Amino acid sequence: MAYVLQVDFKKNGPFGDEMAAEFSGLAESINEEEGFMSKIWTESPETNVAGGIYIFETKKTAENYLDMHSKRLAGFGITDVNAKILAINSKLTEITNGQVK
């Protein structure tokens, strides 16, 4: 069963193309994380919030990534991180064209 990890936190930019340029190396490295399947990057420049929706193969790999990522964010001074790990209902997700394979 696959799991979603939802993460968001306050961030004072950059956003959009500038964020993409600044974090492309990080994006590449996420591909190498154990159990990682995909990520949707999220942002709201209006409210200074950034984050992502990740999909992992197992709950354990999602938990391990969250632990590592929270420590990395703390290194940047970001300590107020909102996160949830949720199971994916693959049967309903398939009906609504979700990509979880």
Image: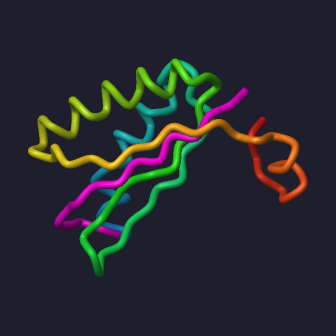
Q: Which residues are magenta?
A: 1-15
Q: Quadrant of residue 91?
A: top right
How was the colour assigned to the protein in this rendering?
rainbow
Reply above or below: 65 against 12.
above
Is 5 in the magenta?
A: yes
Q: Where is the C terminus found, in terms of image quarters?
A: top right
Query: Residue placed at 22% from the left, 33% from the top?
Result: 72
Q: How many marks?
A: 0
Classify residue 67 by image quadrant.
top left
Quadrant position of residue 15: bottom left
In the rendered image, residue 2 lying in the magenta stretch gets the answer yes
Is 81 on the left or on the right of 28, as rendered?
A: left
Q: Residue at x 24, y 70 (%)?
A: 48
As drawn, which residue projects farthest toward the bottom?
46
Q: Position of residue 89 (x, y in %)?
A: 77, 41
Relative placement, left or right, of 21 versus 95 is left
Q: Which residue corresponds to the image point at 59% horizontal and 31% vertical from the top-left? A: 56
Residue 65, above or below 96: above
Q: Image check: 87 left or right of 19?
A: right
The N terminus, quarter of image:
top right
Q: Provide residue 35's location: percent of width, then percent of height.
A: 58, 22
Q: Residue at x 31, y 33 (%)?
A: 69
